[in-house]
Image: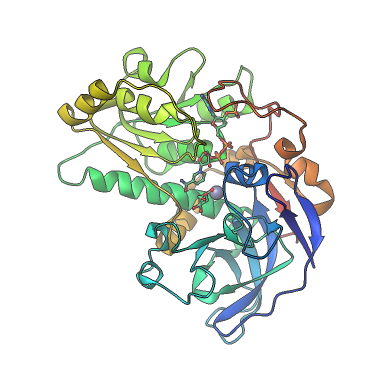
Amino acid sequence: MKAIAVAPGAGVPEVVERPVPEPSPGEALVRICRVGVDGTDYEVIEGSHGGVPDGDDRLVLGHEAVGIVEDANGTPLEEGQYVVPTVRRPPPGVETNEYFERGEPDMAPEGEYVERGIVGAHGFMAEYVTSPADCLVPIPTELAPLGFLVEPISITEKAIEHARATRSAFDWRPESALVLGTGSLGLLTAAMFTETLEYDRVYCLGRKDRPHPTIDIVERLGATYIDSRETLVSEIATAYEPMDVVYEATGYAKHAFESIDALAPNGVAALLGVPGDWEFEVEGGRLHRELVLHNKSLVGSVNSNRRHFEAAIDTLSALPDWALAEIVSGVYGLSELDRAFPEATAPVATPGPGSTAGSDDDTTIKTAVEFEDI
Ligand code: NAP
Ligand code: BGC
Ligand code: ZN
């Protein structure tokens, strides 16, 4: 069968031949239809995040998938049913651990999990994959064409759950919310903020010139676009308004600290980005004081569990069709890898961590690779 793999650091993914996997007891065989591409895939392709399984020289990519159960293999799944796989699995040679037993693999520390398509385990960009049946979440047929969005939406379901949990000890009524980043995670989150979470006032920070499809999406959602080249995150509270919620999806490390100033008293910032190493100065004393004296919270959040996937399926069904159609800028077959991964094939020098320059590919928002038409 065909799969899409990368030797980390190689800079470009390639089509490889792999044997069709055999499901073990408790596993089902899934025929993959579509797999989304996100910022993490580019980090894996560049070699700044993730890693190949032990003993292998390439990693099969893909962690945002939707497929069809081909062989239920005696599990409770139904053959022909569309499913979305979760990402984390126990490390090789370990059947389970306390985090997986509790259904909370997203809370497992490093070393207690692998992530399919990201670190230590092959991903879903292949014609067939096997997976434990309890890691395959059924999805209604009508949602299957965009089923690859369930995983990234589940990331925000988890992050917002944790953000709210930090504010659960008092009567918190968030009205204003700021999303940092107009990549696929940022835009999906902006759509959730306006359409399902229904914050009264939503802002979204990017670094694109008008006209741009991402700005159009932000504004059609009824949110306000803020250009990071004109307004620093630390200036947003005075230039616009203090935010009850900040959701960082840029991976730009200064934003973690600047978010403290963007927050309103009693607000919470969820940090999602995975930056590389970068040393810079912060006003440590003032920021520490700001967090304490205004009851502000910062919460990091990674991955998601089956419960978040189930919530994400409901959210996907509630998001407006036009927004999803605009966010998914292209679905490409195996013969069009350069279009599925436009940033990986572009021969550009990687900007340093402090760069405020955007990417060269300027209109792609989210792509997916198609193995089988839905
Ligand atoms: P992405 O498509 O690369 O989006 C990142 C966006 O942030 C891009 O649009 C980029 O702009 C923008 N950006 C970067 N620095 C900026 C700055 N200084 N000012 C304004 N905008 C800036 O990635 P993604 O898939 O949306 O994911 C976003 C981040 O979350 C990544 O770091 C990813 O690794 C991380 N992530 C984490 C989790 C988790 O579980 N914690 C899950 C998914 C993703 P340009 O387009 O101009 O470069
Ligand atoms: C994935 C998560 C994963 C995280 C860190 C994200 O892109 O969506 O499932 O935990 O990267 O590797
Ligand atoms: Zn991801």
Vertical arrangement, residue 361 with respect to residue 314, above or below: above
Along the viewing direction, whichever of 207 and 17 lies nearer the viewer:
17
The image quadrant of residue 81 is: bottom right
Kindly identify the residue that appears in the image at 57 percent across and 56 percent down.
119
Image quadrant containing the N terminus: bottom right
Residue 282 location (% of width, % of height): 35, 22
Vertical arrangement, residue 205 with respect to residue 6, above or below: above
Kindly identify the residue that appears in the image at 64 percent across and 78 percent down.
79
Relative placement, left or right, of 182 versus 103 is: right
Kindly identify the residue that appears in the image at 56 percent across and 25 percent down.
215
Residue 174 location (% of width, % of height): 27, 35
Residue 365 location (% of width, % of height): 63, 36
Colour scheme in use: rainbow
The image quadrant of residue 299 is: top left
The image quadrant of residue 311 is: bottom left
Along the viewing direction, whichever of 188 and 259 lies nearer the viewer:
259
Residue 9 location (% of width, % of height): 69, 44
Give the residue at the far right of this rendering: 335
Report the number of discs: 0
Image quadrant containing the C terminus: bottom right
Along the viewing direction, whichever of 219 and 237 lies nearer the viewer:
237
Along the viewing direction, whichever of 369 and 303 lies nearer the viewer:
303
Relative placement, left or right, of 54 versus 271 is: right
